[in-house]
């Protein structure tokens, strides 16, 4: 199965969980920044790039959307 088809299948999995592809990009970017900060502080070691690790975590369901409630 070509990589393009695999990517489309993963996006479909995310959409079934209620995460559209644009929200997924934002969530993965935030997670990648978090991973990069951990690497810089020597909290974790990385074999892959932070963006790759973030996407894997997102697809595995280890990254959740933070609900920010307005406090008024």
Image: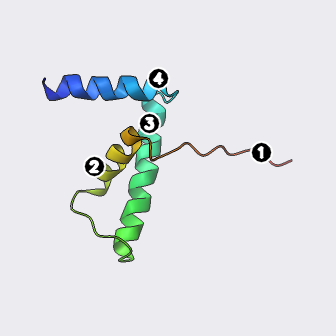
- The residues bearing labels 4 and 2 have C-alpha atoms spaced at a distance of 21 Å
The answer to whether the residue labelled 3 contacts the one labelled 2, judged by CB atoms less than 8 Å apart, is no
- The residues bearing labels 3 and 4 have C-alpha atoms spaced at a distance of 12 Å
- The residues bearing labels 1 and 4 have C-alpha atoms spaced at a distance of 27 Å
Question: Which of marks 1 and 2 precedes in the sequence?
Answer: 2
Please name which of the two marks, 1 or 4, marks the residue nearer to the observer: 4
Element assignment for label 1:
loop
Q: Residue at x 40, y 69 (%)?
A: 38
2, above or below 26, in the image: above
Question: Which of marks 1 and 3 precedes in the sequence?
Answer: 3
Element assignment for label 2:
helix
Coloring basis for residues: rainbow
The answer to whether the residue labelled 4 contacts the one labelled 2, judged by CB atoms less than 8 Å apart, is no
Residue matched to label 3:
24
Query: Is residue 18 rendered to the left or right of residue 4?
Result: right
Residue matched to label 1:
70
Q: How far across and down, in percent of the image, does residue 45 sit?
A: 29, 69
Q: Residue at x 30, y 23 (%)?
A: 9
Q: How far across and down, in percent of the image, does residue 2 sit?
A: 13, 25
- The residues bearing labels 3 and 2 have C-alpha atoms spaced at a distance of 13 Å
Question: Which of marks 4 and 3 precedes in the sequence?
Answer: 4
The answer to whether the residue labelled 1 contacts the one labelled 4, judged by CB atoms less than 8 Å apart, is no
69, above or below 49, in the image: above
């Amino acid at each position: 199965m070509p990589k393009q088809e695999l990517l489309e299948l993963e996006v479909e999995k995310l959409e079934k969980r209620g995460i559209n592809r644009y929200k997924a990009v934002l969530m993965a970017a935030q997670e990648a920044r978090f991973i990069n900060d951990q690497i810089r502080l020597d909290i974790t070691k990385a074999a892959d790039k932070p963006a790759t690790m973030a996407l894997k975590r997102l697809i595995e369901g280890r990254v959740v959307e933070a609900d920010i409630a307005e406090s008024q």
